[in-house]
Amino acid sequence: MSFYSNTNVEARPMGLDLGAVMRQVYLWLALGLLVAFGVSFAVGNSAVATYEAALSGARSAAAARAALSSSILFNPVIWLGSLIAYFVLAFALQPIIMRARPAIGSLFYLLFTALFGFMISSIFLAYQPGTIAMAFVATAGMFGAMTIVGYTTKMDLSRWGSLLLMALIGLIIASIVNIFLNSTAIYWLISYAGVIIFVGLTAYDTQWIKNNAAMVAASGDGDGAQRLALVGAFHLFLDFMNLFLFILRILGGGSRRS
């Protein structure tokens, strides 16, 4: 699938080249990760502070956990609203970026990353800070290696796209089924399969972005370059964050709370 398919456009030199477009992609990715982890850290540590304050004045951990209901993280109205907004944006963000002005697309992209950060902020209650840091470092190393592979390989990875998508759908179905089965074996199978799938998607998405960035750069379409940068950052953001969460599941034997 091509991002930029108008082959009749004459080249309009605007200082664009493949490297410039790819730099935009990774700058938006870095900004999205900064927003997501910043929101996650702020909300998660606020919940941790609430829990620890309640624990110090409560007679039991159960009473301290009950006090967490006052945290923004566990406010049912805010949580439900954020969940609905997250899924709406997850499906609508790419069409918004493609149709709206780049400035509007960038605002929606940053809103999505902030919502993602809010949705995962409970990791600061569930895992030790050292475990989260280790998972982040491992994710950054693995993601960096695979995005280099995707950028430099001569192999056509497009045929892997449909296979990875089918594997991802299977992973989602297995995760839903395991909510009811609560099988430890399936839990670990899902965790390792998730790492493999998102490692593959990182390489696949990077090559897809590179191929389309070359076409956009050749066209000299500045707005097209900005849109591709946002779409590419969106894809890689999801790859990074999901890879991080699966690695955190694997490393996360250290639970913060009992």
Image: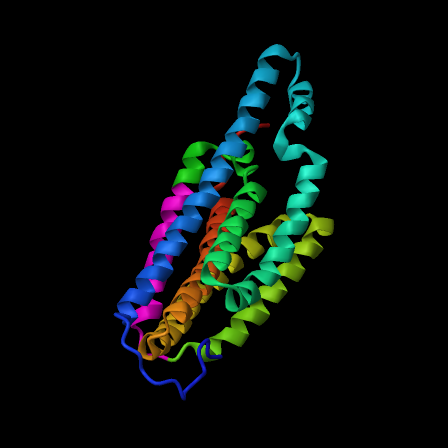
For the record, the magenta segment spans 134-155
Q: How is the image coloured?
A: rainbow
Q: Which one is in front, 242 or 10?
A: 10
Q: In this view, does 238 lie to the left or right of 21?
A: right
Number of numbered discs overlaid on the protein picture: 0
Quarter of image, res 57: top right
The residue located at (59%, 58%) in the rendering is 90
Name the spot of residue 75 as percent of width and height, x first.
68, 33
User: Is 135 in the magenta?
Assistant: yes
Name the spot of residue 29 as percent of width and height, x first.
40, 55
Name the spot of residue 184 as percent of width and height, x first.
62, 48
The residue located at (45%, 42%) in the rendering is 37
Q: Which one is in front, 98 or 158?
A: 98
Q: Is residue 195 visible?
A: no
The residue located at (44%, 84%) in the rendering is 6
Q: Is residue 132 above or below residue 215?
A: above
Name the spot of residue 170 as percent of width and height, x first.
62, 65
User: Is 254 in the magenta?
Assistant: no
Q: Residue furthest right?
A: 180
Q: Is the magenta stretch mostly helix, strand or loop?
A: helix
The residue located at (58%, 13%) in the rendering is 56
Q: Which one is in front, 109 or 187?
A: 109
Q: Is residue 228 visible?
A: yes
Quadrant holding the C terminus = top right
Q: Residue furthest bottom?
A: 8
Q: Is residue 87 above or below residue 211?
A: above
